[in-house]
Image (spheres, rainbow, N blue to C red):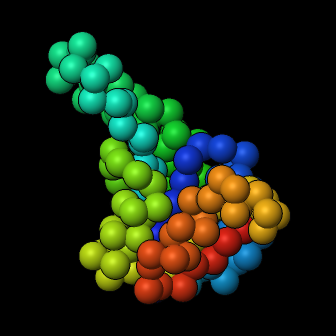
């Protein structure tokens, strides 16, 4: 099974990994994991004040910081893993990559806000559910 792990380095990502670690069936079966983080873009006006190499370095450093503990986790559990970082609007990028990559499942942590909170602010998880044709496993 091809599984897309959408991560942002938050406590909710850590909770998802902890859940994954306690469910041996996800770790022992021949699954292929893609770990995706989506970095929000710097607004164009602000970005125009920096050299392109500096922006690229900023995005890469941010992704590396998010991936560092996850790389340790996947190495510890000997998981076949591909790490991908993108810049953009997270729900759109997650759904698009999951569909294009022919993944079978999207797994992500969720803040677990109430329906009222989602109505007011929206959430990445809710937007991914709305945009993707794939099953989404939310870990709260």
Residue situated in front as seen by the camera: 85 or 119: 119
Q: Give the percent coordinates (x, y) of residue 59.
A: 35, 32
Task: Please tell me in which quadrant of the rendered image residue 132 appears.
Answer: bottom left
Establish if 56 lies above or below 30: above
Task: Please tell me in which quadrant of the rendered image residue 98 appears.
Answer: bottom left
* Residue at image point 52% right, 40% down: 66
* Residue at image point 28% right, 23% down: 45
Q: Residue furthest left?
A: 52
Residue situated in front as seen by the camera: 88 or 86: 88
Q: Give the percent coordinates (x, y) of residue 130.
A: 52, 77
Q: How many marks?
A: 0
Q: Residue furthest front?
A: 120
* Residue at image point 46% right, 61% down: 91
Establish if 139 lies above or below 37: below
Task: Please tell me in which quadrant of the rendered image residue 7 appears.
Answer: bottom right
Left or right: 11, with 30 as reference point: right
Q: Give the percent coordinates (x, y) of residue 94.
A: 42, 64
Residue situated in front as seen by the camera: 12 or 111: 111
Task: Work out whether residue 21 can be spotted.
Answer: no
* Residue at image point 36% right, 37% down: 41
Q: Quadrant of the C terminus?
A: bottom right
Q: Give the percent coordinates (x, y) of residue 87.
A: 33, 45
Task: Work out whether residue 49 can be spotted.
Answer: yes
């Amino acid at each position: 099974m091809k599984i897309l792990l959408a991560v942002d380095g938050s406590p909710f990502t850590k909770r998802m990994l902890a859940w994954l670690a306690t469910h041996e069936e996800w770790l022992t079966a021949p699954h292929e994991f893609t770990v995706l983080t989506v970095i929000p873009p710097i607004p164009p006006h602000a970005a125009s004040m920096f050299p392109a190499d500096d922006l690229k370095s900023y995005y890469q450093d941010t992704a590396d910081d998010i991936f560092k503990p996850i790389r340790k986790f996947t190495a510890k559990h000997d998981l076949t893993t591909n790490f991908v970082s993108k810049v953009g609007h997270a729900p759109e990028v997650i759904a698009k990559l999951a569909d294009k990559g022919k993944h079978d499942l999207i797994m992500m942590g969720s803040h677990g806000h109430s329906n009222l909170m989602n109505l007011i602010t929206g959430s990445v998880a809710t937007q991914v559910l709305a945009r993707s044709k794939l099953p989404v496993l939310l870990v709260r």
